[in-house]
Amino acid sequence: MAKQSNYVIIDTDCGIDDALALMVAFDCHKRRLIEILGITCVYGNVMVDKVVRNVLLTQRLFNLKKDIKVYKGCGNPLMTKLGFEDGFMGADGLGNSTETMAPIDVKHESEDAAHALVRLAKQYPKQIKLLTLGPVTNIALAHHIDPQFFDNLGQVVSMGGLLDTMGNVGPTTEFNYFNDPEAVQVLLANSQCPLIIVPWDTCLKLRMPWNIFDEIINSGKDRGHFIHKIYENQTHHKVFGRSSDGVVLCDITVVIAALFPELVSLSSDYPVAIELTGHLTRGQLVVDRTGRTQRKRFTGHRNAQFMTDMNVPHVIELLKQMVHN
Ligand SMILES: [Ca+2]
């Protein structure tokens, strides 16, 4: 963990893995290792109102002296209709577990997410790490509100796209970037701040062995109990369930890349762009590792580093500690 004060904003479409990522971040915030300036919510795993609710349910676990502000953001992509349906994360985004939780008053700030992003970036110029765990629609909108927005950020760490693995939406597409390719283009074509992309390939490398998962959910701790509830349905999934090598943790990789850079491996800088028109490939992150970046059609790109790997045992240890803190 870097010693300097770390201002963080997390933009999330809070599903199951987002909730776990938020738990690690909230724990760091509570221990004053970082200061989370706000959580901005976006549609994605579920509709944005449910995302707000899921963030609040997760934050409640930490009994913070002062609540972290939660901002509601976009409910739709910039240009297209929502494409998701009730699926992997359940109708509530948390594995259909929320009905069994104590009700919560779903309140958010009156300011919308994009304006909050713009305001906070101006207030803390080049000091904020922005973590994106869902479609980047709020981020693109913030740029449209204030063209200086990206320049005011210290760093963006974004989960999206893929390098070499199979897509989780289409053959070459990953869920977050597939949902709003135009917003990704706004990010790639207009930002110059440091950008780390966490591709789907790297998310798949972070699996928690089932014996450790069982240790956590049977720990008797509130946070362990919460993890048990939200992951219960997923444990029966035919691909990611108990028959697999372990629980796929996805979005926590972004928190690790941003807050524990000593635990991750990064690629060289590669030019990246997003496919907007391909009949089969719309939403594909196009990464030029050939070094032939000057081709005429490869426009709207910028350089980005990719998180390619991490110290998995250490990350798992961090998770275990978080449950017991
Ligand atoms: Ca997410």
Image: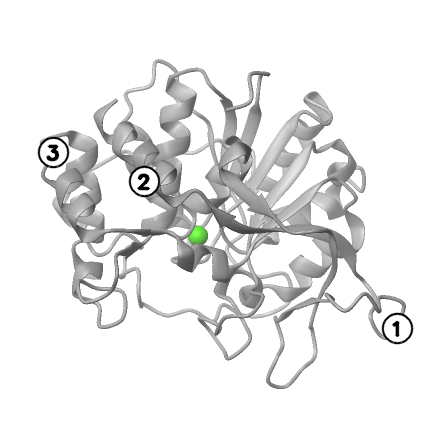
The amino acid type of the residue labelled 2 equals Ile
Which residue does the numbered mark 2 point to in the structure image? Answer: 316
- Mark with earlier residue (3, 2): 3
- The percent position of residue 210, horizontal first and vertical second, equals 19, 52
Which residue does the numbered mark 3 point to in the structure image? Answer: 219
**Viewer-nearest residue: 314 or 101:** 314
Asked if the residue under mark 2 is in contact with the one under mark 3, i.e. CB atoms within 8 Å, the reply is: no
- The percent position of residue 105, horizontal first and vertical second, equals 28, 33
Mark identifier at residue 295: 1
Asked if the residue under mark 1 is in contact with the one under mark 2, i.e. CB atoms within 8 Å, the reply is: no
How far apart in space, not on screen, are marks 3 and 1 (Cα)? 55 Å
Left or right, 273 with respect to 240, comes to right
The amino acid type of the residue labelled 1 equals Arg
- How many marks are shown on the rendered structure? 3
* Residue at screen point 38% across, 28% down: 26
Other-residue count near label 2 (Cα within 10 Å), few / some / many at <14 / 14–19 / ≥20: some
The amino acid type of the residue labelled 3 equals Ser
As drawn, which residue projects farthest toward the bottom?
Answer: 279
Q: Secondary structure at mark 1?
A: loop
